[in-house]
Image (cartoon, rainbow, N blue to C red):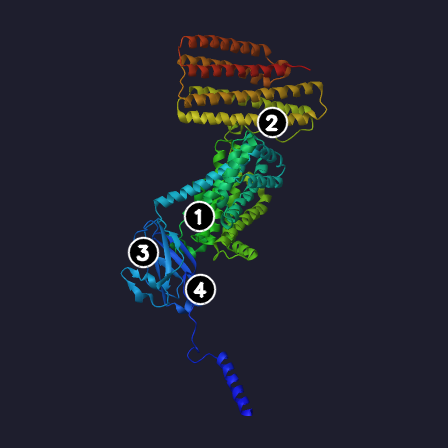
Amino acid sequence: MLRKFFIVTIMALMGHFAVANPDSTSAGSTEIQQLGKETFENLNSSGTPGGSKLSWNLRYSDRSQISNLIIKFRRKIDKEKPWRYSEVISADKTKFELSDLRNDEKYEWYVGCRKDGGDVAAILSDNGPNDEQMVWSDKGKFHTDRPWDFYKFLVLLGSLGLFIFGMKLMSEGLQQSAGGKLRQILSSMTSNRYIGVLSGFLITALVQSSSATTVMTVSFVNAGLLSLVESAGVMMGANIGTTITGWLVSIFGFKVSVSDYSLLILAIGAPMMFLRKSSTKGWANALIGFAILFMGLGFLKDAVPSLDHDSPIVQFFTRFTDTPFFGRIMFVLLGTLVTVVVQSSSAAMALTLTMVLKGIIPFDVGAAMILGENIGTTITAELASLIGNVHAKRSARIHSMFNIVGVTWMVFLMPFFLSGITSVMNIDPVQNGEDATIGLAAFHTVFNATNVLLTIGFVPWLVKLAIYTVPSKGEDDEVFKLEYISSGLTNTPELSLLEAKKEVHKFGKLTLKMSHKAKELLNATDLKDRTRLIKKIAKYEDITDRMETEIANYLSKISADDLSLKASAELRSMMSIINDLERIGDIYFEISKALERKNEDKIWFHQKQRDNLNKLFSLVDEAMEIMIGNLNIEQDDVNESTANLKESEINNFRNKLRRSHLKSIEQKEYNIRAGMVYSNLFSSLERVGDHVINVTEALTEKD
């Protein structure tokens, strides 16, 4: 029994070890896992000119089983043609670049290995490997690029144009929906240079266009509604406000793809365009412009070429690594040139950020170009001031000097600023393109804000320098400056009224200038001269509107004081006069638009019609000369009878023209369309005569 017990026990123990330790035939061997398409993971591809960069991963558990790989590929449209194959690739590699393919074509591809993991080369033939012995990945796709050529250059320009158009449409839409309020803010929030900075920042941030703010500011200075010191503050604020564009592009353009939602935004904005309310149409334009802007940015990212280290443009930039300061200055000039060419600092900024994102230019070069764009954007204000008076030119010059001074000191300190920004924001602009775009947006904001803080105390000096560098050319150059009442009320209401009267007299002389320009336009034959005169009259009309507003505000402040009966009568008289003078400006603007349409439609006057209109212009000019003379004398000396005689002469001649006009139409002596314009013009001139006599009548009113 004992012997039997030991035998059973030993056999049980042997069975236990047999289970725990496999037999010698299987010991040390590895179980082979079946290879399939799941072996290949994370297939990626990116097209290049005439090729593609392919990448993949192998399932970790399968790596040791696979000797090597091969790729098969063909054009998508070549369904019936045989596959093309790459060379045999080591299993250790996870990337391969195809070349010698057709440009701008769609391809499909697979990566594969032998089912048993063996050497693919062993089963290769002229037609490729034996498919029965192969296992292939899921299908991959890629689209080869076109090489960088004139076509792609045009695509780049078109993408940039779409971005600019979107920016312009958005800016104009915002101005259309809130422009009146923005202009009111700009004219009221400028009591000193510091508040001016705030108003300039807010308006530019809202309308997303520093150009709109600077042009508006120049026009206000031209009209005398802003002083040079006040305009300097607004320009500085606009410089900070325009940096918001960089943040929008960096965050929404690169980190968040707004272009993917552009069509949804268009779907919201498009129906709003058909609503009647003007402000709603403005918001529609703003939404559509916003969508188009980011669509353009999306195209821009694709249009900018991806360059390697051996490309000529990259080699060009690396030349200046040994002379960084000289390189900085050169790229500042390049940024200035780009902005001047595209006439939009926002578009230049978007192009710079895109090139930095793609790694075409380094982070510090992008920063230098942004400094240049700050100088380039001043060209907008300079161009706007060309048709303005000396004060508008000086305002634009202040803007230019402010930006040039800021860029000058930043060129020296830029490395320290960039280092500080990357440290504080904890970003790596060298290795990460998106970090670089955010860093440049921050640099743009920090630079402009710092420049404002450093230079705002020197605004009076900038004003003096602008006055010195832009001398006045005489009275005609300063005609739109409200020089008599711009300094505010005097201590004596009667003296304030006297100053207002001088301004009204100057207002009257401006309307006479409009009459002279309108007469010139009637007789002008050269297209360039007509265009110049139409712009001049439009500018004068805008000034008359602003002059009426400013003089009316000034008179309202005077009325708050205790006035004598005579002073009250004079104040009421002037309120009536400035209204008539503003209406005269409106009529001459209407006349200019009628003449513009006549020329566009190629409608020609008969010589007799032209002679009659010239005579009526002369009669109206004579009446206006009498009016201006009456505006410059005391109430008791006003020559009312002469004014009435001239008004009667204008009315009688108008009646004569009307009778002869109807007779000519009846006898078909001239074109009916020319006759309609002719009738409109002599009727408009007679209305000018009515407002002119109204001025004289207002001057003779006694309390």
Q: CA distance from mark 1 to mark 2?
A: 48 Å
Q: Nearer the viewer, residue 681 or 497?
A: 681
Quarter of the picture containing the C terminus is top right
Looking at the rendered structure, the kind of residue marked 1 is: Lys
Q: Nearer the viewer, residue 503 or 583?
A: 583
Across and down, in percent, residue 437 comes to 50, 51
- Pointer 2 or 3: first along the chain: 3
Q: In terms of depth relative to the viewer, which is nearer, 452 or 465?
A: 452
Residue 59, numbered circle: 4
Residue 345 visible in the snapshot: no
Disc 3 marks a residue whose amino acid type is Trp
- Circle 1 sits on which residue? 301
Q: Quadrant of residue 83?
A: bottom left
Describe residue 534's horizontal placement relative to residue 639 as left or right.
Answer: left
- Alpha carbons under labels 4 and 2: distance apart: 78 Å
Mark with earlier residue (1, 2): 1
Residue of label 3: 83
Q: Earlier in the sequence, mark 4 or mark 1?
A: 4
Q: Residue furthest left?
A: 126
- Amino acid type at image mark 2: Thr
Residue 483, how many percent across, how many down? Answer: 59, 29
Secondary structure of the residue carrying numbered label 1: helix
What amino acid is labelled 4 in the image? Arg
Q: Residues within 10 Å of mark 2 (few under 14, many from 20)?
A: some
Q: Earlier in the sequence, mark 3 or mark 1?
A: 3
Q: Of tags 4 and 1, which is closer to the observer?
A: 4
Disc 4 to disc 1, how far (Cα)? Answer: 34 Å
Q: In the image, which is nearer the foreground, mark 2 or mark 3?
A: 3
